[in-house]
Amino acid sequence: MESRRHAPSPCAEPGCACAAITGSAQCWAHTPDHVAWRAGLGSMQLAGAWLSGVDLAGCELAGADLHNARLSGASLRGAVLRGANLEGALLDGADLRGADFREARLELAQLGLACVDAARFDRACLSRCGLVGTRGGNASFECADLYYARPGNAVLTHCSFRGANIARAIFRKARLTGSDFTGAEGQANFENADLEDVTR
């Protein structure tokens, strides 16, 4: 699939139809030394990088500039991205379980179908963020900016939205069982959402 932001090189592995990831001549599956590749992250230009399918589980990326990067299907499980710039990044289908996105910038990012179990987005900017079909329990969005975010059809059970800005957010058909919206500000669209045991 072509990137909306840049055209990646094809994987150098004969017969492979995937794109090469940033920092390698091959796609993630064919990159021979994942440990060495991860060790070189600090010297890479990650803004606009092609990182589709990479495994960054547990990586320390606090404050990193990943705006417009493509991380579709990547694993960021337990990664630390506190204060990182992910504006316009593609995180669709990514594994974000337990990741730390506190105070990160995710405006216009796409997290559709991502798994956010126990992830932390406290005080993060998720304004106009695509969250359609995002799923996870016990995630925290406390004091986050969700202005015009679109978590329609999302499954976000037992999550905390305490003190968040939810003005114009579209929770249509979302499953929000047991979630806490205490102190959340702004009018959101909860049309046909499952609000069982929601605290407001």
Image (cartoon, rainbow, N blue to C red):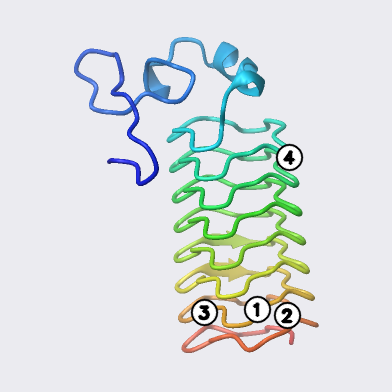
Q: Secondary structure at mark 2?
A: loop
Q: Which residue is mark 2?
A: 181
**Residue 150 placement, left or right of 116:** left
**Residue 2 placement, left or right of 171:** left
Amino acid type, label 4: Gly
Q: Which residue is mark 3?
A: 170
Q: Secondary structure at mark 3?
A: loop
The answer to whether the residues at label 2 and label 4 have Cβ atoms under 8 Å apart is: no
Amino acid type, label 2: Phe
Eye-nearest disc, 2 or 3: 3
* Residue 167 screen position, x and y as percent: 63, 82
Eye-nearest disc, 4 or 3: 4
Q: Secondary structure at mark 1?
A: loop
* Residue 89 screen position, x and y as percent: 51, 48
Amino acid type, label 3: Ile
Q: Secondary structure at mark 4?
A: loop
Indicate which disc, 2 or 1, sits on the residue closer to the N terminus: 1
Q: How far apart are the two marked residues, 2 and 3, measured between alpha carbons? A: 14 Å
- Name the quadrant containing residue 38: top right
Q: Is residue 88 above or below residue 200?
A: above
Q: Which residue is mark 1?
A: 166
Q: Which residue is mark 4?
A: 63
